[in-house]
Image (cartoon, rainbow, N blue to C red):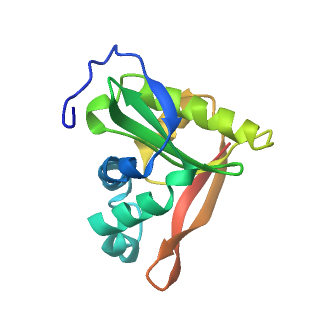
Amino acid sequence: MPGRTPEPDTPTTFRPAKPVDATVVAAIWRSGWRDGHLGHVPDELVAVRTPESFTSRARERVDDTTVAVREGVVVGFVMVVGDEVEQVYVAADQRGTGVAGALLARAESLVRQHGHERAWLAVATGNARARRFYARNGWCDEGAFAYPAAGPDGPVSVPCHRYA
């Protein structure tokens, strides 16, 4: 089934990620990250976000990852740690099908299950599409801040907005 695109009206199910999912999670993550971050984050960070970096990070983060599945195909994922929704990504061909909103709702549920009343996430300031998406889904922009993204020699300061 790899490479097959599920129909947009196909039901979405969720499950904890498995190690075997890391490759597809990495591909979705890298593609979505590049769409939303290129031109909005320091070049130093772009230089280290290689295909290999996404693959190794996806493997390391399996326990924090929930995948969205349609007809047996992983079409998106979220990573939640404590009260932070660290990553929300959907395969490009699944954008506009409701998968992202369903993943965000799943992330909110996971945050509550972790004992927190409120979830938050960081959005690159220049990522207007994501900022509109979170606003449409009831998240509030709590203002600008510098997010410390993991870089080659320690944290890289990324201009972001905190949504909750």
Measured as percent of width and height from the top left, residue 7 is found at 26, 18
Q: Quadrant of residue 89?
A: top left
Inspect this view and state whether residue 9 appears: yes
Q: Residue at x 36, y 68 (%)?
A: 53
Q: Which residue is drawn at 65% across and 52% down?
A: 143
Q: Quadrant of residue 76?
A: top left
Q: Residue at x 42, y 57 (%)?
A: 58
Measured as percent of width and height from the top left, residue 65 is found at 52, 47
Q: How many marks?
A: 0
Measured as percent of width and height from the top left, residue 109 is found at 67, 32
Screen quadrant of the N terminus? top left
In the image as oriented, which residue stretches furthest toward the top? Answer: 9
Q: Compared to 123, does 40 lie above or below?
A: below
Viewer-nearest residue: 33 or 112? 112
Say left or right for 2 vs 89: left
Q: Compared to 134, does 125 lie above or below?
A: below
Say left or right for 155 vs 47: right
Q: Compared to 58, does 90 lie above or below?
A: above
